Image (cartoon, rainbow, N blue to C red):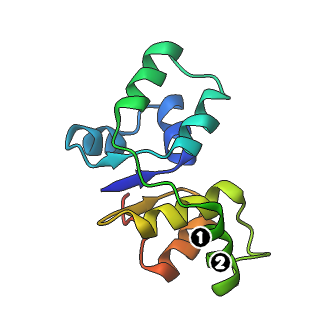
Amino acid sequence: MILADTSVWVDHFRKKDAELYRQLQRNNISIHPFVVTELVLGNLPKRQKTIAYLDLLPMAKVAQMGEVRRMVEAHALFQRGIGFVEAHLIASTLITPHTVLWSRDKRLRGIAKTFGVNADVS
């Protein structure tokens, strides 16, 4: 399963992303509630229909705050250029079996790669 982060979705909503569309057709895309929340704060096409569709996607497990904080400390993820949501996405990817993280954010991809959860999606 591929957890697509906000950057992937934003690009898709601006200009249809063929690879995201292909992965959606294959039922390979999951979502995280923080990604959905970031998206609903923006300008979505066909807003209500899009939100309803996002809510139907398989949901990644949500890491507990303590789990995320322990991960940040144990792996020295502080001052690496990622934020709260990105740290949660990495943690959720780690605790959701058979899941990788797809991001267009270079820093997040680099950190995900060190954990072995970076999606190799072009």
Could you classify mark 2 by the number of other residues whose Cα lies within 10 Å: few (under 14), some (14-19), or many (20 or more)? few
What residue is shown at x 35% (from left), y 55% (from top)? 2
Assess whether mark 2 and mark 1 are in contact (beta carbons under 8 angstroms): yes
Instruction: Please state which of residues 71 and 77 is positioned toward the viewer in this rendering.
Output: 71
Q: Quadrant of the N terminus?
A: bottom left
In this picture, is 36 found above or below 86? Answer: above
Q: Where is residue 17 in the image (x, y as percent from the top left)?
A: 40, 39
Q: Residue furthest left?
A: 26
Instruction: Please state which of residues 53 and 91 is positioned toward the viewer in this rendering.
Output: 91
Residue type, numbered disc 2: Arg
Q: Residue furthest right?
A: 79
Rendering quarter of residue 106: bottom right
Rendering quarter of residue 36: top right
Give SS at disc 2.
helix
Q: Quadrant of the C terminus?
A: bottom left
**Residues under labels 1 and 2: Cα distance?**
5 Å
What residue is shown at x 32% (from left), y 66% (from top)? 97
- Check disc 2 and report the residue beneath it: 70
Q: Where is residue 93 in the image (x, y as percent from the top left)?
A: 44, 64
- Left or right: 31, with 44 as reference point: left
In this picture, is 99 found above or below 42? Answer: below
- Left or right: 52, with 25 as reference point: right
- Check disc 1 and report the residue beneath it: 67
In this picture, is 11 found above or below 4? Answer: above
Could you classify mark 1 by the number of other residues whose Cα lies within 10 Å: few (under 14), some (14-19), or many (20 or more)? some
Rendering quarter of residue 104: bottom right
What residue is shown at x 65% (from left), y 62% (from top)? 65
Q: Position of residue 91 (x, y in %)?
A: 53, 67
What residue is shown at x 47% (from left), y 36% (from top)? 12
Residue type, numbered disc 1: Glu
Give me the disc on residue 41.
none
